[in-house]
């Protein structure tokens, strides 16, 4: 059993957040090793179910909340300034939380012996300075690549700000990758983006809980098209508007009776207002369970124009046996073990619309893609397999010989500490 210090950028529960990857990896590795879990959070109120869910798999949780940062008069004044002032205040609060985390990490390493440190995220990178314990870094996806794609499509006035963000993110991600030779990426595409085609860093792919994401009802048969995601996340919001204004008018030339569902929390006002123009479009906002909506779908469309990593929404739709129409930038992240995903790919609005039309018109092709999509997920998207890959990387970093230790369930009497 290894003793692991695990550093994470946010509380990875509930699973409606963008951090479900962290939860599943902790869930599987925490049963086999002794984990001390440290994380940042920006949440003003932590959901009551979060700590009990994590307590099952870790020995101790330490949370660092930027909201606990002391507020000087200057900081309070900046918080009153629209946009820029609030962003400065948020940045200062995060920096304070990272400093508190660094102090705690040094204290823990002085008091205890850890075999390895697992690190995710980017904001807390200064915490790794002068750490002598072996480090495993999960680089995840390449944010800078997504920002570059966005910059190419943005209005001219927005491009300087996006270019500055692109440079900042790229430098940070390159610095993160240089921290240790024991690093992993979420896909081959992301590894090659950052380190080139010759690099052989481990791939710890995104998984899906395909026992949970399982169809329990037949499709509606009513030309039901579904797109899901957190709708205040810019790539999703952009894709939803692209779907409404550019793709669907082309589909309606062939199928006049559609049922379009845009499912996900925090839809931007612009999206809600645009959807009101179309009688066949429903923007649901947050839902307790997305599976019934996917269960109604004849086609799942993910028309993202910029993306990195792997889109959970696409894996979940495939697991639910819903045929998927998407873009090349999304499909590139799905390739596993040299196997291409069974999805319909469109490079532009015309090709995406043609893909949707073809599937709505051909029940046999829908059935084939539904079956192949589920098979792909079961064969290549197991969280257990991903956890094993991360565990192997930790064993190598710690200098252990694979098989020389005996995995066992660790006792979990966790202590929640919120530094002030």
Image (spheres, rainbow, N blue to C red):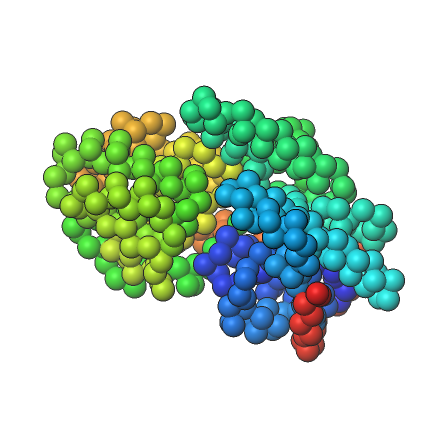
Q: Give above or below for 266 relative to 58.
A: above
Counting from the top left corner in percent of width and height, residue 55 is at 62, 72
In the picture, measured across the screen, residue 261 lies left or right of residue 83, that is left
Q: Could you tell me if residue 340 is visible in this image? A: no
Q: Give above or below for 325 relative to 20.
A: above
Quarter residue 22 falls in = bottom right
In the picture, measured across the screen, residue 78 lies left or right of residue 175, that is left
User: 361 or 74: nearer the eye?
Assistant: 74
The residue at the point 25 percent across, 40 percent down is 274
In the picture, measured across the screen, residue 383 lies left or right of residue 75, that is left
For the C terminus, which image quadrant?
Answer: bottom right
The residue at the point 39 percent across, 59 percent down is 213
Q: Exactly how many numbered labels are in the figure?
A: 0
Residue found at the very far left of the displayed protein: 256
The residue at the point 27 percent across, 27 percent down is 350
User: 28 or 301: nearer the eye?
Assistant: 301
Quarter residue 344 falls in = top left
Counting from the top left corner in percent of width and height, residue 296 is at 24, 55
In the picture, measured across the screen, residue 121 lies left or right of residue 146, that is right
User: 372 or 25: nearer the eye?
Assistant: 25
User: 194 or 49: nearer the eye?
Assistant: 49
The residue at the point 47 percent across, 41 percent down is 334
């Amino acid at each position: 059993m290894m003793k692991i210090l695990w550093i994470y950028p946010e509380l990875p529960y509930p699973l409606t957040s963008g951090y479900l990857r962290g939860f599943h990896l902790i869930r599987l590795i925490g049963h086999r090793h002794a984990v001390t879990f440290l994380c940042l959070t920006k949440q003003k109120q932590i959901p009551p179910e979060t700590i009990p869910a994590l307590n099952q798999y870790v020995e101790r949780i330490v949370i660092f909340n930027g909201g606990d940062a002391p507020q000087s008069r200057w900081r309070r004044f900046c918080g009153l300034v629209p946009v820029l002032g609030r962003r400065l205040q948020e940045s200062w609060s995060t920096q304070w939380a990272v400093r508190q985390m660094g102090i705690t990490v040094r204290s823990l390493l002085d008091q205890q012996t850890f075999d390895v440190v697992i690190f995710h995220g980017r904001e807390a990178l200064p915490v790794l300075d002068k750490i002598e314990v072996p480090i495993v870094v999960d680089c995840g996806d390449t944010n800078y690549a997504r920002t570059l794609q966005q910059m190419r499509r943005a209005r001219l006035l927005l491009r300087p700000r996006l270019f500055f963000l692109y440079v900042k993110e790229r430098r940070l991600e390159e610095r993160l990758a240089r921290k240790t030779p024991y690093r992993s990426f979420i896909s081959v595409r992301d590894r090659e983006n950052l380190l080139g085609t010759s690099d052989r860093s481990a791939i710890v792919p995104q998984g899906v809980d395909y026992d949970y994401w399982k169809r329990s009802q037949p499709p509606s048969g009513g030309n039901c098209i579904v797109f899901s995601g957190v709708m205040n996340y810019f790539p999703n919001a952009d894709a939803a508007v692209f779907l409404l204004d550019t793709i669907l008018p082309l589909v309606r030339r062939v199928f006049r009776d559609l049922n379009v569902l845009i499912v996900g929390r925090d839809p931007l006002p612009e999206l809600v207002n645009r959807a009101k123009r179309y009688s066949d479009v429903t923007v649901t906002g947050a839902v307790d369970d997305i599976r019934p909506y996917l269960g109604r779908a004849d086609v799942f469309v993910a028309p993202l124009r910029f993306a990195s990593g792997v889109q959970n929404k696409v894996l979940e739709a495939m697991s639910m046996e819903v045929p998927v129409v998407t873009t090349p930038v999304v499909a590139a992240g799905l390739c596993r073990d040299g196997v291409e995903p069974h999805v319909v790919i469109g490079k532009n609005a015309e090709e995406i619309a043609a893909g949707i039309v073809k599937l709505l018109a051909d029940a046999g092709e829908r059935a084939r893609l539904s079956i192949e999509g589920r098979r792909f997920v079961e064969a290549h998207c197991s969280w257990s397999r991903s956890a094993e890959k991360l565990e192997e990387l930790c064993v190598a970093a710690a200098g252990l010989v694979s098989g020389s230790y005996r995995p066992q369930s660790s006792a979990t009497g966790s202590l929640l500490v919120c530094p002030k």
